[in-house]
Every structure is written in C-alpha cells, then in structure tokens.
Amino acid sequence: MRKEFDVVIYGATGFTGRLVAEYLEKEYGGDLRWAMAGRSEEKLKSVRDEMGVSDDVALIVADSNNPQSLSDMCASTRAVVTTVGPYQLYGEPLVKAAVETGTDYVDLCGEPAWMKDIIRDYDDQAKQSGARIVLSCGFDSIPFDLGVYHLQQHAKDVQGEPCGRVRGRVRKMKGTFSGGTAASFMETMKRAGQQPEVLDWLKDPFTLVPGFDGPPQPPGHKPIHEEDLGSWSAPFIMASINTKNIHRSNALMDHAYGQDFVYDEMMLTGSGEQGEQIAQGIAKGNAFGDNPPKPGEGPSKEERETGFYDVLFIGDGKDGPIMASVKGDKDPGYGSTSKMIAEAALCLAQDISHDETPGGVYTSAPAMGSKLIDRLQNHAGLTFAIES
C-alpha cells in the first residue's frame, strides 16, 4: 500500500530537526513527499516559515506521551527521522510504534546502553514486522561505519580479503559537539550510577553484538606516537560508540571483516613535542568543554557552514597499508549530521528493498552500504576516497 509520505521528521522544531527540514526543502523541494512532526502545530508552523519550507509540507502533531499519535504518524510514512534525544529518555515509544507499524526508522543515537536495550527488546519484533531500525545515523557513526566499509570493499577487490586490522584517525575537524550528544552522555553516566553493569557495557567494544566475544581491542585512552603516520594520536570522544557500531556492522554482515577484526579510533595531533603536548592535553581535558550547548542550542549558520572533518582509515594489507578517507563539508555535529540522517531515511525509503535489507535493528553499513555512500556523495557533501 502506498504511504502518504516518504519521510516524516519527528522533532522538527528542535535545533537539528529544523536543519533536517531546511535541507530536505533545499535539496528536494516539491519532488519529495515529506512532513514535519512535533508536539505543537503552532510551533511547527512557525518553524516551517522560519526555515523557508513550503506551505505544502504537511504538519503532524505527535507526542511520545501519546502512543496512538506516534502509531498514526508512523503508519503514514515509509520512514521516520527522529532527532528527539536523549533517546534513553524519549526514544523507546517511537521505536515501538515504528516496529509495530513496520515503518523504517533512523535516529542520531550515541547511547550504547539504550541501544543494547533496543537490540534486545525489538530486533526480533522488527524482523517480523519488516521495520528497518537504523541507529546512529549522524556524525556518530555514519562517516566511521561507512569509512571502514568503503576501505574493506576496496581491500577485497585488490587483495581478495578484508583487512584484519583497521585504524580510524581523525586528521582534521572543525565544529562543536551537539547539545544532544552532551546531554546523552550525562544521562548515560546517570544511568551507570544506578545500574553499575552499564559501565561494563561502555567498556566492552562488543556490547552491541549479543552472544559474541571478539578479540582484545586497543584501549585508545592514552596518547600514542604512530611512526608510520608521523604523528601523535590522542583519545577521540566518539570512539566509544563508533567502535561498538562498527563491530555490530561486522557481525550483521556475517563477520565480513573477519571474526578476529580489530578496530580503534583516535585523533591525530601532529609530530614532535607540540603534537605530544596537544595529545596529552586532549587526554586530560574535558571533551565537551566547560559550557557545552544544551539540547536545542547550537552553532551559528556561519559556524556550521565553515566547519568540516577529515577522517583517515588505515588497513593492514597483505602488501602494505590500504588507506581510505571520508571528508565532510560542514561542521560534524549539526550541518553534516542533518544531511546524513536525511539521506539515510531517503535511502531506506527509496533505494533499499526488503529483499536486500529485511526488518531488524541495524547500523548504517549492513542496512544501506554502497547505496548510502552514493547518496551522501551526490547530495550531502561527503567524499569517500581511496588514498593508497
């Protein structure tokens, strides 16, 4: 049965939700059947006008405190985008509605404990209903998950097998972490205080792969010097969630990277004493700063437009290193994230059949793979390259 919409943005009045709406209007305009959803019709109208969105774009009143409104919203669309976090506070009712109605779902979640809950409680149901629930469709973890996927596809082409060891290294990045990311981290720590095993889940790189105990992984919490890269490397704040998602991707693709796959992420800080000092400073500092943005707050348009990121992936190949990179043309936490989650939803709604990807709880690489890479390069300002 044909759905009324291809995509609905839930949380369209929030900071990131507004950017998703602005992007869909600018990139697709009247060629796409989409809607904006939130708790207040009046506020939705205001945001629609403010972001220059056409009056033809429908508005849907839906609230996580009203399960029927979420079910009705999900039933009207092929895919739902949610930017309403922290997800451990507000996310489960929408996942439940999406699963029950067989609706595809994408979010920006970087909360491993909640994701573990969702996999446990909804994966089997989603397989039965056909809903594709794809978690972490923003800066965490699309560039990293698809960056490793891109490198491994190339490795199979040139050497006949994947690389058993891959390093992800952020070469350059300009931008701020989102207020939602900071709030999600705080909520995770609060839950860990009440539920001690959550700390074990956060430390375990295979937390999102139930029943699998993989090989030891590099710790990544102390600065190291990497001679082959000519640089010091510092801990990277997103590594905890990205590594877990990448190991889940590997498992969902029948361990396409190998049962003994090893992956870690760090940030390059440069060579010599200066590079070491920067790395030590990052390791000791507060990654979110003293005054992180609150949910609903974010950088100015100029700051979003001038932001960027450049991530290098180094695989241990049979005949030497294999290198790939992913670059984004906007600040990671907002400008690029809003485009990535929009394209992920469109990819599910328009490009991926249920024969290719049946229902279940996914990460981006096994759910969409090369088709999402193509979309991100054609529309969202990302560049995937093989460098050696």
Image (cartoon, grey):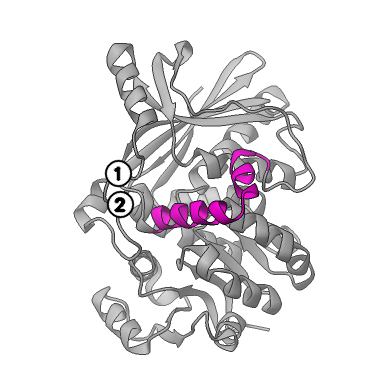
Q: Secondary structure at mark 1?
A: loop
Q: Residue at x 64, y 39 (%)?
A: 204
Residue 20, labelled with which disc? none
Q: Residues within 10 Å of mark 2 (few under 14, many from 20)?
A: some
Quarter where residue 175 is shown? top left
The answer to if 193 sits in the magenta stretch is yes
Query: Mark 2 sits on what residue?
Result: 292
Q: Is residue 379 visible?
A: no
Residue type at the position of mark 1:
Gly
Q: Are marks 2 and 1 in contact (CB under 8 Å)?
A: yes
Looking at the image, residue 283 sits to the left or right of residue 253; the answer is: left
Q: Position of residue 109 (x, y in %)?
A: 52, 57
Foreground residue, 225 or 277? 277
Q: Can you say whether 96 is above or below 265 in the image?
A: below
Residue drawn at the location 63% of the way across and 25% of the way down: 165
Which quadrant is home to the N terminus?
A: bottom right
